[in-house]
Image (spheres, grey):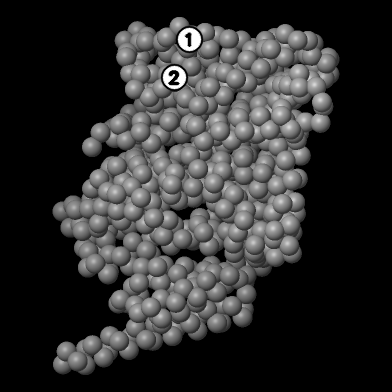
């Protein structure tokens, strides 16, 4: 299987221009210098915000056109058409103009010269074109639709030209709304340094270690390779920012193993895709959305991470239980002792986890800033790399890591910039209020209806959109709806984030599922449907913490937390068993109904629901045990 071809097909970020020889060295050097620039600005520069942000986006546009061609398949080495060079220079110069003349522009207030509007419009259009190249069409369709609405109907000024001037001024020349607003600000301050950290961590060989340690721990059990996929994806998700990349990276190992041990191709691909997509909700990175969420809500980053732990664990528990029950139902074996890596020798490589552990410890303690903690973790990754014989760090590899970090920032920063455009137009036109009022009218005073309508909106808007931009769009459009209905801020933002992410699994634009299907040579649509079923936790858990925020440790006692953990785990098992049609043995239709109902009641916090739910699951267990005894009696 050509994994590069799979990535290029399903992941826009992988469709890069081909540079070879001296040209490759020059381009990588530019990317590495950009990473160093980001580190310098983060820790040492005392520039105005507009100077810092406009120079950051200007550099992104410059290197973005260097890396991404106009369309897929443009693979001729060292070729950059004249129009790409023109877009690169004109687009980046628009932002650099703002950098150079920032003080004068600020003093102008809302009065702009005609040429400044032209420069701003050029900058916006070039950013949108770069976004089309590296992120994809769906987010562009949303952004352009909002811009057209703002110019045509959304702004009150009767003069069309004045509406355009006002829109460009807000979107390009302010830091409160538009390109240089919260998403890009957060990206330049926090996300950039974490992307660089991820590039260094990747070169320590930690991804390979995650797969090996997962194999050693769960590979030998029934359906072992599928369980390896779940555990490895959960671990990789802690530092990964792409569900497609996670699917292809670990799936290239786990999917063939799953097929070899008896899993159907669609199930093997779905298990990997659902686990890999879940990596985006796994602390501490959460696809970089954790930083944006903390900034939007106005709470500490560590608070977001702590509250994300239980829902993420329940999600992965649901997938793990589902693959276990499938293995039992089909009588699938695990890996043989000869196929399993030895556990004790792997423990000698546990030092690879030190940078990640150090990062989490520093962030959780609050003793250091997020950026400072990431910087220390980068140094730790370099030190760790010196002791890894298989992936020993060298000056050349350090330079490569800086270059990879620079390239990794492009998609995230561009997506953040376009998400800022979407959020800016929504705010300027009052469209957010209209959307809120529309859903509130439909929902009345029924929170559950508002949650359902918001879920549908998030899934549609999240199709084909990368994690960071996905959350930005949901936070601007959908989270205020739930907050207006009385859902706590954190629960509302978690809710829209979860349902934006599952768009990577739900048809018709299920990119992670389709990537897994390509590796497994399976039917893409069947894979997406199976992945959606396996990821049932992502469809249930958000409703629970929206209706009862105790799951997010909001106003919860220790007893509340313990009881929620226990009952939710049993509940997830009940729901997963119902969907698989297998508990201790195959289930009848009424057993599946009772198991699903009991599981749902157990997941929802509350003494009454817990008692009823536990009773229903217990009834199913008793029936299953009775069936087993009767079969034994008949066999005798």
Q: Are marks 2 and 1 in contact (CB under 8 Å)?
A: yes
Q: Is residue 162 left or right of residue 217?
A: right
Q: Nearer the viewer, residue 290 or 179?
A: 179
Badge 2: how crowded within 10 Å, few (<14), some, or many (20+)?
Answer: some
Q: Is residue 296 left or right of residue 206?
A: right
Residue 621 quadrant: bottom left
Q: Which residue is mark 1?
A: 83
Q: Residue at x 56, y 43 (%)?
A: 461
Q: Position of residue 546 (x, y in %)?
A: 64, 60
Q: Position of residue 459 (x, y in %)?
A: 54, 49
Q: Nearer the viewer, residue 227 or 462?
A: 462
Q: Is residue 465 above or below residue 71?
A: below
Q: What is the number of the mark on residue 355?
A: none
Q: Is residue 326 above or below residue 163?
A: below
SS type, badge 2: loop
Badge 1: how crowded within 10 Å, few (<14), some, or many (20+)?
Answer: few
Q: Residue at x 80, y 22 (%)?
A: 159
Q: Is residue 518 above or below residue 499?
A: above
Q: Which residue is mark 2?
A: 70
Residue 627 visible, this orientation:
yes
Q: Position of residue 122 (x, y in %)?
A: 63, 15
Q: Quadrant of the N terminus?
A: top left
Residue 330 quadrant: bottom left
Q: Nearer the viewer, residue 449 or 310?
A: 449
Q: Residue at x 34, y 77 (%)?
A: 587
Q: Residue at x 43, y 62 (%)?
A: 318
SS type, badge 1: helix
Residue 352 visible, this orientation:
no
Q: Nearer the viewer, residue 75 or 299?
A: 75
Q: Position of residue 26 (x, y in %)?
A: 41, 10
């Amino acid at each position: 299987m050509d994994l590069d071809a799979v990535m290029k097909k399903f992941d826009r970020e992988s469709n890069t221009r081909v540079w070879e020889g001296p040209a490759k060295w020059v381009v990588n050097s530019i990317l590495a210098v950009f990473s160093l620039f980001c580190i310098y600005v983060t820790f040492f520069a005392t520039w105005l915000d507009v100077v810092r942000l406009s120079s950051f986006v200007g550099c992104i546009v410059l290197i973005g056109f260097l890396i991404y061609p106009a369309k897929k398949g443009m693979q001729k080495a060292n070729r950059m058409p004249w129009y790409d060079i023109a877009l690169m220079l004109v687009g980046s110069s628009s932002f650099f103009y703002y950098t150079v003349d920032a003080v004068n522009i600020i003093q102008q207030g809302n009065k702009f010269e005609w040429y400044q509007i032209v420069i701003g419009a050029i900058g916006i259009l070039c950013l949108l074109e770069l976004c089309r190249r590296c992120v994809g069409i769906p987010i562009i369709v949303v952004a352009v639709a909002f811009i057209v609405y703002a110019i045509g109907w959304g702004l009150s000024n009767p003069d069309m030209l004045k509406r355009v001037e006002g829109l460009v001024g807000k979107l390009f020349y302010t830091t409160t709304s538009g390109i240089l607003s919260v998403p890009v600000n957060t990206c330049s301050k926090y996300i950039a340094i974490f992307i660089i950290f991820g590039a260094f961590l990747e070169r320590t060989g930690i991804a390979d270690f995650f797969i090996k340690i997962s194999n050693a721990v769960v590979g030998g059990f029934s359906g072992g390779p599928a369980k390896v996929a779940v555990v490895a994806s959960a671990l990789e998700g802690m530092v990964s920012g792409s569900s497609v990349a996670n699917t292809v990276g670990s799936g290239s190992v786990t999917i063939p193993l799953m097929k070899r041990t008896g899993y159907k191709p669609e199930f093997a691909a779905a298990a990997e895709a659902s686990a890999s997509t879940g990596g985006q909700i796994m602390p501490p990175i959460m696809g970089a959305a954790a930083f944006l969420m903390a900034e939007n809500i106005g709470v500490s980053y560590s608070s977001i991470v702590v509250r994300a732990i239980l829902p993420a664990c329940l999600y992965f528990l649901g997938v793990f239980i589902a693959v276990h029950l499938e293995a039992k139902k089909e009588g699938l074996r695990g890996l043989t002792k000869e196929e399993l890596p030895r556990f004790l020798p792997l423990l000698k490589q546990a030092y690879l986890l030190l940078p990640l552990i150090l990062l989490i410890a520093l962030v959780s303690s609050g003793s250091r800033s997020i950026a400072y903690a990431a910087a220390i973790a980068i140094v730790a990754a370099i030190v760790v790399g010196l002791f890894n014989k298989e992936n020993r760090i060298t000056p050349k590899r350090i330079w490569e890591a800086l270059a990879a970090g620079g390239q990794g920032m492009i998609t995230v920063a561009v997506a953040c910039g376009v998400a800022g455009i979407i959020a800016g137009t929504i705010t300027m036109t009052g469209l957010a209020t209209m959307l809120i009022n529309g859903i509130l009218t439909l929902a009345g005073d029924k929170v559950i209806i508002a949650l359902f309508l918001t879920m549908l909106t998030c899934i549609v808007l999240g199709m084909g959109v990368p994690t960071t931009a996905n959350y930005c769009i949901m936070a601007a459009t959908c989270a205020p709806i739930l907050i207006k209905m009385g859902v706590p801020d954190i629960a509302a933002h978690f809710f829209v984030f979860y349902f934006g992410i599952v768009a990577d699994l739900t048809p018709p634009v299920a990119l992670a599922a389709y990537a897994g299907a390509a590796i497994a040579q399976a039917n893409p649509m069947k894979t997406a449907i199976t992945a959606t079923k396996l990821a049932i936790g992502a469809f249930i858990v958000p409703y629970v913490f929206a209706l009862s925020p105790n799951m997010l440790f909001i106003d919860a006692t220790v007893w509340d937390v313990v009881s929620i953990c226990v009952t939710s785990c049993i509940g997830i098992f009940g729901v997963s068993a119902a969907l698989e049609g297998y508990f201790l043995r195959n289930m009848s239709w009424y057993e599946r109904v009772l198991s699903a109902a009991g599981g749902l009641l157990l997941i929802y916090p509350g003494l009454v629901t817990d008692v009823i739910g536990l009773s229903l699951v217990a009834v199913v267990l008793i029936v299953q045990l009775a069936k087993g005894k009767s079969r034994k009696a008949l066999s005798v």
